[in-house]
Image (cartoon, rainbow, N blue to C red):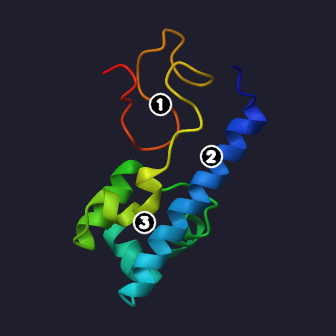
């Protein structure tokens, strides 16, 4: 199954929006401001704003920094996102052509070959 660049871009946008919503929710629960996040990540408030709107993706190291600062696991930070099924199973679409490797979307490890 081939995935077009447009579909890939749409999936990335959806993922960015979902991740940013989870980060915003945790910040709201803790009554934290953008300046706090800017200091934690070592970036400007403008860059934080873009990430919180989903216009720019958070990197994996940034998410780990946020989780650590909030004293959460990465799974807790991302909430239900950490348990969503991948729309692209390993070996399909954007995955490896050999069928081995990591699923493109989703955070669950591949278990179909266990």
Image position, residue 71 (x, y; %): 22, 71
Q: For the residues marked 2 and 1, what is the alpha-carbon distance in whole angstroms?
A: 14 Å
Question: Tag 1 or tag 2, which sits nearer the N-term?
Answer: 2
Residue at horizontal 56%, vertical 61%? Answer: 18
Name the quadrant of the C terminus: top left
Q: Is residue 80 left or right of residue 94?
A: left
Name the quadrant of the N terminus: top right
Q: Is residue 69 visible?
A: yes
Q: Quadrant of residue 29?
A: bottom left
Question: Tag 1 or tag 3, which sits nearer the N-term?
Answer: 3
Q: For the residues marked 2 and 3, what is the alpha-carbon distance in whole angstroms?
A: 22 Å
Residue 106 higher or lower than 19, as above or below: above
Image position, residue 74 (x, y; %): 31, 58
Residue under numbered circle 2: 12
Residue under numbered circle 1: 103
Residue under numbered circle 3: 43
Residue at horizontal 39%, vertical 74%? Answer: 37
Image position, residue 94 (x, y; %): 59, 25
Q: Are marks 2 and 1 in contact (CB under 8 Å)?
A: no
Q: Which mark is residue 26?
A: none
Q: For the residues marked 3 and 1, what is the alpha-carbon distance in whole angstroms?
A: 30 Å
Q: Quadrant of residue 54?
A: bottom right
Residue at horizontal 47%, vertical 78%? Answer: 25
Q: Name the front one of labels 3 and 1.
A: 1
Please tell me which residue lies in front, 60 or 41. 60
């Amino acid at each position: 199954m081939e995935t077009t660049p447009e579909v890939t871009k749409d999936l990335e946008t959806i993922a960015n929006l979902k991740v940013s919503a989870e980060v915003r929710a945790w910040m709201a629960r803790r009554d934290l401001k953008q300046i706090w996040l800017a200091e934690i990540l070592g970036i400007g408030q403008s860059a934080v704003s873009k990430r919180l709107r989903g216009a720019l993706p958070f990197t994996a190291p940034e998410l780990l920094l946020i989780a650590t600062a909030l004293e959460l696991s990465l799974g807790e930070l991302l909430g239900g996102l950490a348990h969503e099924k991948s729309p692209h199973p390993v070996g399909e679409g954007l995955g490896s052509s050999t069928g081995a490797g990591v699923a493109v979307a989703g955070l669950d490890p591949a278990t179909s070959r266990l």
